[in-house]
Each structure stands twice: as C-alpha cells, then as structure tokens.
Image (tube, rainbow, N blue to C red):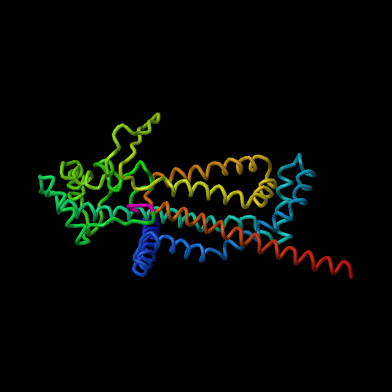
Amino acid sequence: MSNTLGSIWAGFNGFLRGIIDLIYNLVQSHGWSVVLFTLLIRVVLLPFDIKSRQSMRRMSKLNPKIQALQKKYANDKEKFQQKQAELYKKEKINPLASCLPMLLTMPVLFAMFAVMRNVANEELVRMLLTIQNAVGALTDPEQIRAAIDGMIASGTLHFEPWLWIKNLWMADSPFSSVLPLNAQGLSGLQVIAGLLDSDGLQALKDFVETQPYLVVLEHFNAVPMPGVALNLLITQLSIFKNPNGYFILPILAAATQYLSTLLQPMDQQNTAAQSGGQQAGTGQIMKVFFPLFSLWICATSNSAFSLYWLTANVIQIVQQVALNWYFDKQDKKLEGAAKEVTEQ
C-alpha cells in the first residue's frame, strides 16, 4: 500500500514538474514559469472554489435558524447536532463542500514544495559541478577568477534571476548569498539520478570547503559583511555584501495571507458561530498563525517556492474579490425579484 501511494505521489510530482518544464520551454524563465503555472492551477481549481463559496454563503443564510436551534437545545448537544444535520439535509447543504478546495489545493501545495526543492537542488548541483570542473584543480586566485569570467562569458555558468532576486534557487533574503557558503549549505542535497551519485555528492561537499571555492564566493561578493550580523537567541544571521534578495517575497507572502483571511471574515465567522465559540476562537488564532507560517516557510525556502506561495495568495485574493462581488450582485437581483413579487 505504501509503495503504491509513493508511486502515485512521485507520479503526481513528475506531472507537475513536466508542466513547469513545458512552460519554461515557452517563456525561458523559471520565475515566470512558476507564476504562469500557479495561475493555471488556480484556474483549474476555480470551479471548486466557486462551489465552496456558494456553500458557505448558503450556510451563512441559515445562521439565524442554527442560532435558534442552539438556543433551543442549549442543554442537549446531541439533539442540537441531530437537528442541525436535519436542517442541512432539508436545505440540501453539505458543510464539507466548503472544505473541498483546501483538500484539493493542499496536495498541490505540498507537491510544489517538493518539486521546487528538487528543481532548486538540481540547478544548484549543475552550477556547482560546473564551477568544480572549472576551478577545482586550480590554486592561483587570478586563474580561478579568469576561469569564472570565462564561464560567464561563454554562458556555461549563469544564475537564474527574477526581478530583484539574483538566484531563484536560493532564499530571497539579505541573510542568504547567491551560492551556498559551505557543506552545511548543501545539507538538503540528495543523490540526483543521472546527475549526482553518492560519491559525487560527497566530493561536492568537500569542494565547497576548499580555498578555490572561497575565491569563487569572494568573486561574486557572496561573503558576509564584516561586523554586521543579527544576533538571535538560538542563532546569528549574517548580512551579505551581495545578498540574494531583500526579504520581499516572505513579507509579501505573509501580508497577502493575512489579507486573504480578512476578505472572508463573515463566512468564516458565521460558520464558526454555528459550531460554538471554541471554533470561532480557533479561527482567530489561524488568522495570526497562517501569516506567520507563510513568513517562516518562505524565509527558509528557495525563492522559486516563495514565488509560488505569493502568486497563489495574490490570485486567491483576486478571486475572492471577484466572487464576492458576483455573489453580492446575484443576491441583490434575487432580493429585488422577491420584492417585486411581494409588491404585486
């Protein structure tokens, strides 16, 4: 069973990777490939999102009846739940329908994390192997710099930039350089079929601890600024002379995650109210937790995944605004029609 699930999961990851590679072949930019891929995924999931919002709005309209049942059966929780279920059945409402988009998007989110990690690892390995093959046997700093300039001029060595980000496969942070600093920075790398075996991985980790690689880092200014660091209780973060980014993606991801929760407060509050104050309190906690989680996951992941996370948030916000406007307009039409019938 576990082998079957593993095969399905690997196949799903490979399917997503294939789509990203296809888009990349068209636009020749991994950054914009991620943006377009995210847009495609959200469009595919849009019908489920519409059904979810329809269900939540119908449930919110039942809120007065649910509150009446809560008051009537305040001392009989089992009876209340029975009557609540009967009311949902009578109104043909499935409370789980509002959870469907999350059940569909969460596997995609986890798969994208794995795919972006694998893509980032492969691209980093290719860069490092190119550098290792070119300068690994050199000892003179001038020869190493000349070799680097030659690789850049010939196109054999290049970073994957996107707007302000210098290397999409490293974190968008002033505390991250454009290249891993040492073997500890390669701790997440694994054997890559057809590209890197276990011996090659160890050789690569040994290489990034050598003097030639230090010259490479200095050539790209990928070294910490002396005397400039952020001291935390459990670690110390260095600020680099040539930072890979400026923490823009993590901050925007957290901000858009918070804004997304603000755009659906009524539906969430009404739904939570139907299940009691404990769930409502949990909803308030989630409004704080998810933005902070977004900040953390994007700050510690490569920029490609952070870009996916932010783009998904932005698209979701646009969808929320558009769908809220559409449903509000439909409700006004129905109210107007009902009013005309009453007046006649």
On the rendered structure, is 207 left or right of 62? Answer: left
Q: Quadrant of the C terminus?
A: bottom right
* Image quadrant occupied by the N terminus: bottom left
Q: Is residue 171 above or below residue 194?
A: above
Picture residue at 57% right of the left edge, 66% below the top: 47
Q: Residue furthest top?
A: 233
Residue 62 at what x, y percent from top left?
74, 54
Residue placed farthest to the right in the image? 344
In the image, residue 133 above or below residue 236:
below
Q: Identify which residue, 230 or 309, lies in the foreground.
A: 230
Instruction: Tell me residue 173's x, y (percent).
Output: 38, 45
In-image side of 152 versus 104 (left or right): left
> Looking at this view, is 65 or 310 the one in front?
310
Q: Nearer the viewer, residue 77 or 195?
A: 195
Q: Quadrant of residue 230?
A: top left
x and y percent of residue 166 in the render? 33, 52
Q: At 34% from the left edge and 68% from the top edge, which residue is drawn?
A: 25
Q: Residue 130, position in %: x, y?
A: 19, 55
> Image check: 232 left or right of 226?
right
Q: Residue 253 lies in magenta, yes or no?
A: no
In the image, 244 versus 10, the foreground residue is: 244
Is the stretch drawn in magenta largely helix, strand or loop?
loop
| Magenta stretch bounds | 164-168
- Which residue is located at x 77 percent, y 48 percent? 69
